Image (tube, rainbow, N blue to C red):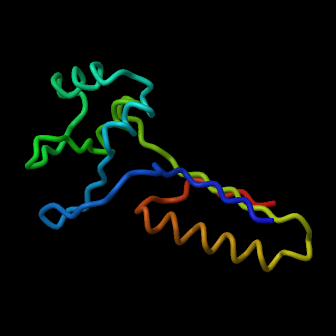
Amino acid sequence: MFTFLIKYVSKAFITLNNNKKEVFMKAKDVINLLRISRASLTKYVKNKWIEVDILPNGRYNYKEDSVYAFINKNIDRKTYVYARVSTRNQKKDLENQIEHLESKVFELESKIEQMEKD
């Protein structure tokens, strides 16, 4: 049995803006992550604590970096990876699992701070 742990916002999406990759979140996801009301989220945007991209229909996409900067008060997020298998006979599976996790972290343009394996 494989265990995969990776820090990732499930409903984030990526856009290219002026050849710069930006990750955005929907309001519902920001509200759930911060555990706040929609009124509080509106206040945070109005005070420019959280940056947004305004769509042509007037809706907002919330910049993921801005949301996490607000949570962490500009502390960099770190990525930790943990991989394990049940028995020693699955050592090859463990190596495949680690390789898969490293590729996922690379796709997210992050770096691994620490890797643990069992």
Residue under the image location 35 percent in, 21 percent down: 37
Residue under the image location 78 percent in, 62 percent down: 84
Residue under the image location 63 percent in, 74 percent down: 99
Count of number-bearing discs: 0
Does residue 6 sit above or below 97 in this rendering?
Answer: above
Does residue 65 sit above or below 45 in this rendering?
Answer: below
Q: Quadrant of the C terminus?
A: bottom right
Q: Give percent across and percent down for residue 103.
A: 53, 72
Q: Give percent across and percent down for residue 51.
A: 21, 37
Q: Give percent across and percent down for residue 48.
A: 18, 28
Q: Nearer the viewer, residue 60 or 2?
A: 60
Q: Quadrant of residue 43?
A: top left
Q: Nearer the viewer, residue 86 or 10?
A: 10
Does residue 46 sit above or below 17 in this rendering?
Answer: above
In-image side of 102 versus 59 (left or right): right
Q: Quadrant of the N terminus?
A: bottom right
Residue under the image location 38 percent in, 52 percent down: 12
Furthest toward the bottom, the residue is 92
